[in-house]
């Protein structure tokens, strides 16, 4: 646990047991969001773990379970980090005016990811 608190990428060297330990993985992703890549599949599908990871680095979405791309809370945290995270959101979230507005305030080009229905 101390190692991943110092460097989240230390999770790469961890045993499968530690990669499945939610406390260890949470500490790792809070240090380096993309350490999520080395977490067990079960924890890559855990909303609390993924939320912490994308708060630290929106690129961690690449390692999250697909169903979490439909989580408004997770996508909002990711979009606050990087407006381009919107492109990985589930289709249903591309109609969420608040989510799209958060992205567009960073860069108006993020509107290209919004649904046609929202833009009409």
Image (spheres, grey):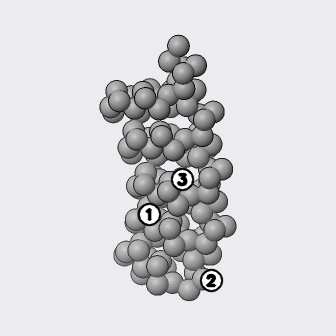
**Can residue 68 be seen here?**
yes
Earlier-in-chain disc, 3 versus 1: 1
- The answer to whether 23 is drawn above or below residue 84 in the figure is below
Residue at image mark 1: 34
* Residue at 50% in and 68% down: 37
Packing grade of label 2 (10 A; few <14, some 14-19, many >=20) is few
Nearest-to-viewer mark from 3 and 1: 1
**Residue 23 in the image, given as x and y percentages of width and height:** 57, 71
- What is the secondary structure assignment of the residue under circle 2? helix
Label 2 or label 1, whichever comes before in sequence order: 2
Q: Does residue 23 appear left or right of residue 104 in this picture? A: right
Q: Is residue 69 above or below residue 108?
A: below
Badge 2 is on which residue?
17
Q: Position of residue 24 (x, y in %)?
A: 54, 74
In-image side of 47 versus 57 (left or right): right
Q: Residue at x 33, y 33 (%)?
A: 106
Disc 3 to disc 1, how far (Cα)?
A: 12 Å
Whether residue 105 is visible: no
Q: Observer-nearest residue: 60 or 4? A: 60
State the separation of the CA atoms marked 3 and 2.
22 Å
Name the residue tied to disc 3: 51
Residue neighbourhood size for the residue with mark 1, other residues' Cα within 10 Å, grouped as few (<14), some (14–19), many (≥20): many
């Amino acid at each position: 646990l101390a190692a991943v608190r110092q460097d989240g990428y230390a999770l790469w060297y961890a045993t499968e047991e530690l990669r499945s330990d939610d406390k260890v993985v949470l500490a790792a992703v809070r240090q380096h969001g993309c350490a999520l890549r080395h977490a067990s599949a079960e924890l890559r599908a855990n909303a609390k773990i993924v939320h912490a990871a994308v708060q630290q680095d929106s690129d961690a979405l690449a390692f999250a379970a697909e169903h979490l791309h439909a989580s408004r809370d997770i996508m909002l945290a990711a979009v606050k980090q990087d407006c381009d995270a919107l492109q990985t959101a589930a289709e249903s979230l591309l109609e969420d005016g608040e989510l799209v507005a958060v992205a567009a305030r960073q860069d108006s080009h993020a509107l290209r990811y919004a649904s046609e229905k929202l833009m009409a």
